[in-house]
Image: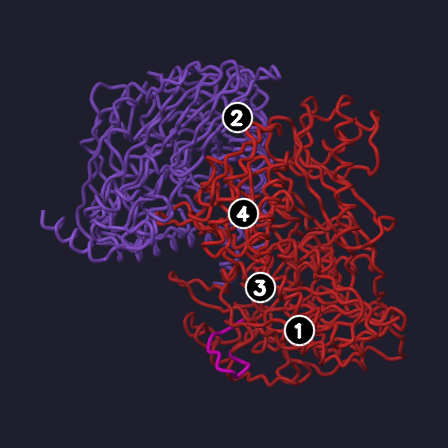
Chain colours: A purple, B red
Amino acid sequence: MSVDPFTLEIIKNGLVVANEEMFQAFARTAKSPVIYEVLDFAVGMTDSRGNMIAQAPGVPAFSGVLDFAAKEVLEKWGSDLHPGDVIVSNVPYESGTHLNDVTLALPIFYKDELIGMILNKGHWTEVGGMAFGSWNPNATEIYQEGIQLPCVKLYKEGKPNRDVIDIILENSRLPEYTLGDMEAQVASMKVAEKRVQTLIEKYSVDNILLAMKKLLEDGEKYARLKLKELPKGEFEAEDYIDSSIAGTEEPVYVRAKITITDEEFIVNFTGSAEQVMSPINSPYPATVSGVREVYMALTDPHAYPNGGFFSPLKVIAPKGSIFHPIKPAPTSTDWEAIAFATDLVWKALAPHVPDKLTAGHFLSIIATIVGGINDRTGEPFAIVEPQPGGWGAGYNMDGTSGLVACGDGETYIASSEVYERNFPILVERYMLNVEDGVGHGKHRGGFGVIREYRILNSQVLVTIQVGRHDFPPWGVNGGLPGPGNRVIVYRDGKGEEIRRISAEVLKKGDLISIRTSGGGGWGDPLDRDPKLVLEDYRNELISLEVAKKVYGVVIDPEQMEVDWEKTESLRKKRRQC
Amino acid sequence: MGYRLGVDIGGAFTDLVGYDDETGDFIWVKGETTPFEPSIGVLSTVKKSRLDMSKVIMVIHGQTLVINSIITRDGAKVGLLTTWGHRDILELQRANRRDMYNFRYKKPKPFVLRYLSLEIDERIAGDGKVLKALNAEEVKRAVNKFLKEGVESICVSFLNSYINPEHEIEAGKIIREVLRENDREDISITLAHEITREWGEYERTNTAVLNAFVKPKLAHYLSVLEKEIRGMGYKGPFFSMLSNGGMASFDFVKEFPIYSIESGPIAGVIGGIAIAELMKEKNVIILDGGSTTTKASLVEDLTPKVHSEYYVGRDKFNPGYPVKVPVIEIEEVGNGGTSIAWIDEVGNLRVGPKAMGADPGPACYGKGGQEPTVTDAYVINGLINPEYLLGGEMKIYKRLAVKAVKKIADYYNISVEEAAEGIVKIANENAANAIRIISVQKGYDPREFSLIAHGGSGPMFAPFIAEDLEIKKIIIPTIPPGVFSAWGMLLTDIRHDVIATNVVKVGAETVNIINKTYSEVDSSLTRIFEEEENLSADDLVIFHYADMRYKGQEHTVKVPIKTGAIKEEDIPDIIEKFHVYHERAYSFRLQDSPVEIVNFHGVGVVKVKRPVIREIEKENVSVEDAIREYRDVFIHGDYSTMPVFDRRKIPTETKIKGPAILEDPTSTVLVLENQELVKDKYGNIVIYRG
């Protein structure tokens, strides 16, 4: 019996809510802070063919990977799937991201019929490999990055598969956390399954299948509407990834060609460099995720991100390239190349879709680890964090300052007070990076940050990977680029700029100075409203000199006023040359 | 004796209730809210009550000035002093991108401009030691700059002041001195540690800055009220509702207005708890269905959940502004009686969050509203009696409702009644979602709770929600929905919370530190009651809670701790209690992990005499006498005839089977076919399912 459109709406909502409940249940019951604090996980549900009907990603980089895992499970296990099975998978190349992100899949059955699949992909703190936490800028092949789980059964018809579980736990430095997260993952998926079964009981299986179909159709219909609003044609962008983080002699060339029609949105990365022997490679599903993020930004950031909505999107990346690496390429810091997949599409389209996109931002997550044994307590400690930075200017707005990069989402930067209480460091400065500045323009970029840690322990080990230094955040329409990200380490008062360090020793009194880049500008700085230049000066964001040299604005610092006459003649002169 | 008054400012109306403890007399009056000068509406409502103010013994006030002033950014020009190197704290915030696919995302705008955020050379370390003494000269220079720039309110927030506030105290003294020298003592001062002693510099600074922002305005407003009401002959004390579910003297709120950021909805929860207590229910969900939003709150063991994790203006895509003061947890969704039904881009029916409010209101009000609303749907399907809304005081036009809903019906090519039922279904689903968020998503099973539904639309949503979430029992309070919040105010006690962060591992060796920290919290509470409230500490009852966690984890759970000195032998009990609470909230325990207290939370309460709900006199009437009419109501896709009762005439303690509609001049209650209702001896309607 088919139902009225409003009841169907309620069933659809039920399926979406099932995902949200799974999301909350996992966030509430996981044992690792990376799950419940950083929300580094995603949950979702597909139909019986692996089409994503509903999902809840905690970070944007996870918005496009679950359906790959679902399709892999269907391909490998097909008719050998049974109620109560749970499949585990983390191999990056064709269905995953870096090894830390472990996907579990639970098939949903009605009687003997497979009607869908529930998925939960979470960042496990530890999956073994050469370094604690399983990611390391120095890895050269995947075998150094941890255990690989090639789509095998974790539960068989409701019973745990002890063999596989024991192998997983034996390969983890933190087996208790690994087991805890895994169990929480399974429990959260059961919450969603139960909800779906209740919906079936209440509304019949046919109506559930109808609701699944309708969710996909709605998504697709909405995507086509949004596609109509975009400019049509071909758009291109190119860029380089810093050689220092790619472990190469030359910078790594990347490019994208975007073709937009009324029906399709095609992103082609052909021509980008080959995979590298450093872990920044972006597995194909991660590349797709990166593109899906900017596709959401371009169409409707508040759209519901399901398979139907993504159906016009095609991503082409040749095998063996940095955007589609093959075994044994390392991928544990894949976020660096994923960010470029997002950024290339962004860069190509920013001038054409100004109401949705800004100029370039600081892009690199600048993943930082400071750890060691605390002198005072004798206990180990570790700070693991991304850094915030400056975002680009828009056609009618200045960029936002001090925001996490595009690969992060609802990610909170820790409180200095909490750090100082828990760890032997002093957060000497945490402020806007007015020293290195921003990309100036009619609208200027947002400011990066200066974040400085003074070491109070006899020694600590520091790992940092700094991208977007040599090729800084780009400007649009005459807006200037940002300054680029920098990290300086001061030992005995002597500063040295670092780009990629792994478990390097720092001593008491040493200082780490992280200085993230400001965003790119939009439009010619000489067109900036002098009153805004005055505001920036009054707020001590720019100097008198920058106001004059870059913006052609003469300010009387005593009266805190613009000297309009002098400004006009200076700008006139500057425009002529 | 005499009356105690509760006066609550709402969006459209200012409600007043009065209760005479001795005679049990209960009065209520509604006046218009005057948003531009709220004191006018309050005073005219008080006058409208025609009470002899010289015989009133207590005035309790709930205001929306603090929240409105923040939302409209209409407050004082604030100057901020910060620690050197940490000037941009208000701009940096936590750097999160809540609207994660929006590449043009903007953070909430700070309440202090950068040039008025000045760094002071001073430093307290993470363990509270002074690393660098306060530079007094810099403070003086900063204050002089503030004076020059026309600053009206000064805020001081230094790093680690939660553990050692001595630099903030010292800076406060210097500021006061400079202001005195310049004869500018009208400028108010807020020291962050006086607002909260919890760690987290952004959240604490923002809270303190918001306090500074609203302080001059609120102090002025409360002074005007005091003066005017005193002028009417009133001699008793003035209290203001606080967000923690208690109340405090006007003097306290003038100093710390941020503590009263939420009041009306909070009073509704307090009222709900009183009903629960009366009905001997321990675990309830309180649903407040208003005209533009629906609010839900979960109460376990008659205790509301009070947390200092409140945000102004936070939603799915906006991080909002953190406010670290104790607030009763309430979930709000944009779905109420005047919410608009609309068709989205791909052709799905939606309800809310946009609403028509009171003016022009739903189409059926005939005040010019054209959009179809939930109320219009009720009118079309016969759930609301067009002749009887507000007892017939208000004219309802069914044909206008039909005209508005026809747009929806035509789109789907269905009848107007079917479209109206679609609107009702979606609105019910939205309201149920609010309850799912506070229960299922936090680890509670809604089937173990009873539902208390009040507000104009609460009793209309409740029967459907109960079916959906399998809730067994619904209670519709006897207090008229329009004044439920104001009535709740009369039930509040004088309450203050003090929360202090001090990370302490729980063990035999730390008993002294734990006791010392609690005794500091207790003396802060005693000081507040004696100095700010002018009350004797003899009447003060103190409760202790601890925000506890496993060492190495960030998230905490709030655990009640016994009051009075803790002994070594109490430690295992405290740890075990934490394991139990943690397991319930997070589903696991780490039996061998060390356990820490992060926040020491003290609650001080001085009880106030409460109004009692009296039993109604039993009349010898039959159920049939209470039936006003039989009406055709469109439900489940067809018309069916059901009895409509006059709620007031229904005999008590008599079972009536659904389907049925209950009406009285202020509300409509719907009972579904497999439900049964009983009016209890107090006049509350209790609906049982299945």
Residue that carries the numbered disc 2 in the rendered image: A154
The answer to the question of whether label 4 and label 2 lie on touching residues, with beta carbons closer than 8 A, is no
x and y, in percent, of residue B433 in the image: 58, 55
Q: Secondary structure at mark 4?
A: helix
The answer to the question of whether label 3 and label 1 lie on touching residues, with beta carbons closer than 8 A, is no
- What is the number of the mark on residue B268? none
Name which residue lies at 67% across and 80% down.
B390
- What is the number of the mark on residue B42? 1
Q: Are marks 4 and 2 on the same chain?
A: no
Crowd band around label 4 with a 10 angstrom C-alpha radius: few (<14), some (14–19), many (20+): many
Would residue A206 be seen by someone viewing this image from the given angle? Answer: no
**What residue type is disc 1 on?**
Val
Q: Alpha carbon of mark 4 to alpha carbon of mark 2: how far? A: 47 Å
Q: Nearer the viewer, mark 4 or mark 2?
A: 4
First in residue order: circle 3 vs circle 1: 1
Q: Alpha carbon of mark 4 to alpha carbon of mark 3: how far? A: 27 Å
Q: Alpha carbon of mark 3 to alpha carbon of mark 1: how far? A: 23 Å
Crowd band around label 1 with a 10 angstrom C-alpha radius: few (<14), some (14–19), many (20+): many
